[in-house]
Amino acid sequence: MGVEAAIPEADVLLVNDDIPSYSERMARAGDHPELVSFAGGGEGCVDSRLLTMPNPEVLSKSIRATAQVFEDPKSKALLARIELVAPSEANVLIIGDTGTGKELIARHVHALSARRNGPFVAVNCGAFSETLVESELFGHEKGAFTGAFSSKAGWFEAANEGTLFLDEIGDLPLSIQVKLLRVLQEREVVRLGARRPVPINVRLIAATNVRLEEAVKAGHFREDLFYRLRVVHLELHPLRERPGDILPLARHFVNQYRRRLGYGEVTIRADTEQKLCQHDWPGNIRELENVIHHGLLIAKNAVLRPEDLYLSTLKLDRDVEPVVEAAAEQAVDQLEKALLALFEECHEDLFDKIEEVVMRTAYQYCHCNQVQAARLLGVSRNVIRARLIKIGAISALK
Ligand SMILES: Nc1ncnc2c1ncn2[C@@H]1O[C@H](COP(=O)(O)OP(=O)(O)O)[C@@H](O)[C@H]1O
Ligand SMILES: [Mg+2]
């Protein structure tokens, strides 16, 4: 597929690309290098889904931002830290709520690094099912699974010599987290169904909302991977905590969208500015962008009035939410994840071990009463007794 066929401002590109090299793709991309697909290493690469946003810097002719807004002291400090971190080869974890600018920051890190001429591949981990995410990340060989009609490079290979941005890393299943850790340690990937590893040279930038630590505590995210990724991290504050950005961002979006809509200059009234500053912005910069876009559509006489702003009334209790979320997690779900982790560790006699844990825990829960433990588990007393004897929890004489 040629880039010219893509929608110029698409956030999602569906790509079926058979152009072999990155430079060739760039050459073909012409005016839209930001739309170059990094779907795979050429041969046999089919239908890779990439979630990506055009790079503002290379889109000077379009409505996308050329300048990023970093006005609040907190944002200025962040920018200084980005400039410090970007040239290093270290993997980076970007932490921030939805809409705070994580992807934008990731692109900025890439642009300020020695890899800037290599690919930037952005992927949302939450957008793929568990079975799909593995072959998408690491690629697969022909016949690796039903439906694998051709071999295909994964995102890691596609991002070779460049940066791989994994958004919503907390959504990666535990089994994939283990493999990701291995790839980071060994700097090579093994495609599904392949024997030989492929060396890769990729810088990983992962992004997560602030609740990844909760996920670690709840056993949904591997602690070792978390600490490995967190070595270099960039934290994005919610918009309400960097009020100095609100008006500059609002002006920035007004300019961006008025051009897009073919309007001339637009004035933001003082009382409109006041309303913008007083809002809580639960949806952060993305919400502000949408509010401005919508406001311009209904504004009259090139003036943005307070009544043109449709602000959300959603107020989240952010301190309580993670606890509620964690509590709401189904125990069975957690059990499944724990099992997956055990499977990954390849224990011997795994079934016996799991059965032992089940029996012993039930027995202790029932204060060493075999009848009650059997009832709790829905098995006969003989079953539990035999098992407890085998593991030495009770003697055969008891
Ligand atoms: N500092 C900034 N200056 C200008 N625009 C920004 C800035 N940060 C974020 N944006 C814009 O806000 C929107 C949301 O940003 P994004 O990076 O997608 O957030 P996240 O990945 O955290 O959900 C995008 O359209 C992005 O261009
Ligand atoms: Mg994002």
Image (tube, helix red, strand yellow):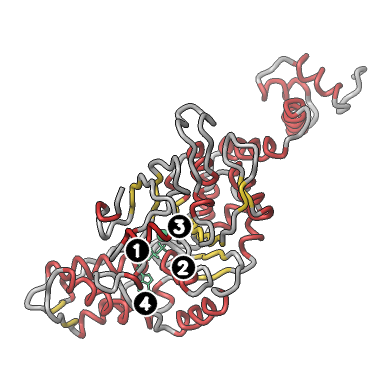
Q: Residue, x 54% and y 79% (percent of image)? A: 81
Earlier in the chain: of badge 1 and badge 2, it is 1
Q: Residues within 10 Å of mark 3 (few under 14, many from 20)?
A: many
Front tag of 1 and 4: 1
Q: CA distance from mark 2 to mark 3?
A: 12 Å
Earlier in the chain: of badge 2 and badge 4, it is 4
User: Which numbered dot is residue 204?
Assistant: none
Q: Position of residue 113 (x, y in %)?
A: 52, 72
Query: Tag 3's secondary structure?
Result: strand
Query: Tag 2's secondary structure?
Result: loop
Query: Tag 1's secondary structure?
Result: helix
Earlier in the chain: of badge 4 and badge 3, it is 4
- Judged from this view, the residue extending furthest toward the left is 301
Is residue 3 something that shows in the picture?
A: yes
Q: Position of residue 365 (x, y in %)?
A: 73, 33
Is the C-beta separation of discs 1 and 3 under 8 Å?
no
Corner quadrant of residue 330:
top right
Q: Which residue is mark 4?
A: 68
Q: Amino acid at mark 4?
A: Gln
Left or right of 305, for residue 36: right
The answer to whether 269 is drawn above or below residue 191 in the figure is below
Q: Which residue is mark 1?
A: 33
Mark 4 sits near ligand 1, with its Cβ under 8 Å away:
yes
Mark 2 sits near ligand 1, with its Cβ under 8 Å away:
no
Q: Residues within 10 Å of mark 4 (few under 14, many from 20)?
A: some
Front tag of 4 and 3: 3
Q: CA distance from mark 1 to mark 4?
A: 19 Å
Q: Which residue is mark 3?
A: 121
Q: Which residue is mark 2?
A: 117
